[in-house]
Image (spheres, rainbow, N blue to C red):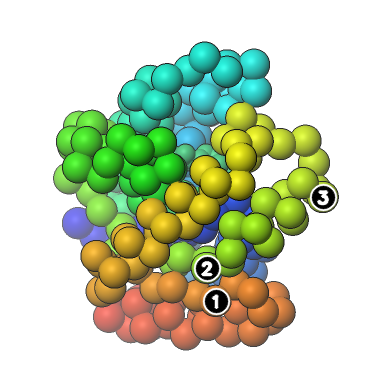
Amino acid sequence: MKGCFITVEGTDGSGKSTQIELLMKYLTDKGLDIVFSREPGGTEISEKIREIILDIDNKNMTGTTEALLYAAARSQHVEEKIIPALEAGKIVICDRFVDSSIAYQGAARNLGADVIMQMNSFALHGLMPDMTLFFDLSPEKGILRKKNERALDRLEAEKLDFHKRVYEGYRMLCKMYPDRIVPIDADRSVETVHKDVVEAIDRLLKEKHYV
Ligand code: TMP
């Protein structure tokens, strides 16, 4: 497929949003055609599923239901938005993708990576990211940042142990996919982290003949 698919991952509060904003500006300034999206969400239907998943009142939601809802939102997103954008040769930057399901539902909810990949075999429609940036910040620091920002959603409100398992899930993914996932130490200044992001993205753009 044409285009370029970049995903951004990290534990809650790892500074993803700030870094995505800077990256988008960097790429737009280069005159590149960018589409931004996020998961869960990115399309009208997927955003509605997001509301159900993150609703703090849905305390009885089982891990399996949660994983299937993320996969359903993803399926709609991939077919309706991501694949068409890539086919049009665009650079798609997505805040979270299937690695989040492996870390949160697979590792933290204990469903296992294999079950999550099985569930997502429909949702992915054969698509995987060209590059994934993983913002590496300890869960203790991340969740503290979030608490200081705003009221927490259902996933953020999980106990620290849950967030530690998410983090371990990401560490496992980094070991499994060293060619795709670029770990970036997020416990540094915004500018320093951004420099590392630019270095990784420039490498990918060259490989893909965008620059
Ligand atoms: P966000 O706050 O980064 O927008 O993500 C929403 C929450 O959903 C966040 O706590 C991570 C979680 N999540 C999963 O548990 N599984 C998934 O597949 C995705 C995409 C997100």
Relative to 83, residue 51 above or below: above
Secondary structure at numbered mark 1: strand
Q: Residue at x 46, y 65 (%)?
A: 134
Work out how far the residue at label 2 is from the one at label 3, CA to CA, in angstroms.
19 Å
Residue kind at label 1, given as amino acid type: Asp
Whether residue 78 appears in this view of the structure is no
Secondary structure at numbered mark 2: strand
Q: Position of residue 6 (x, y in %)?
A: 39, 61
Disc number placed over residue 63 in the picture, else none: none
Q: Residue at x 67, y 51 (%)?
A: 143
Relative to 70, residue 6 above or below: below
Q: Nearer the viewer, residue 52 or 126?
A: 52
Relative to 46, residue 125 above or below: below
Q: Are marks 2 and 1 in contact (CB under 8 Å)?
A: yes
Residue kind at label 3, given as amino acid type: Asn
Q: Is residue 27 left or right of residue 69?
A: right
Q: Position of residue 202 (x, y in %)?
A: 42, 82
Q: Are marks 2 and 3 in contact (CB under 8 Å)?
A: no
- The residue most toward the front is 161
Q: Residues within 10 Å of mark 1 (few under 14, many from 20)?
A: some
Q: Residues within 10 Å of mark 2 (few under 14, many from 20)?
A: many
Residue topped by disc 2? 136
Residue topped by disc 3? 148
Q: Position of residue 29 (x, y in %)?
A: 59, 74
Residue topped by disc 1? 185
Q: Residues within 10 Å of mark 3 (few under 14, many from 20)?
A: few
Sequence-earlier tag: 2 or 1: 2
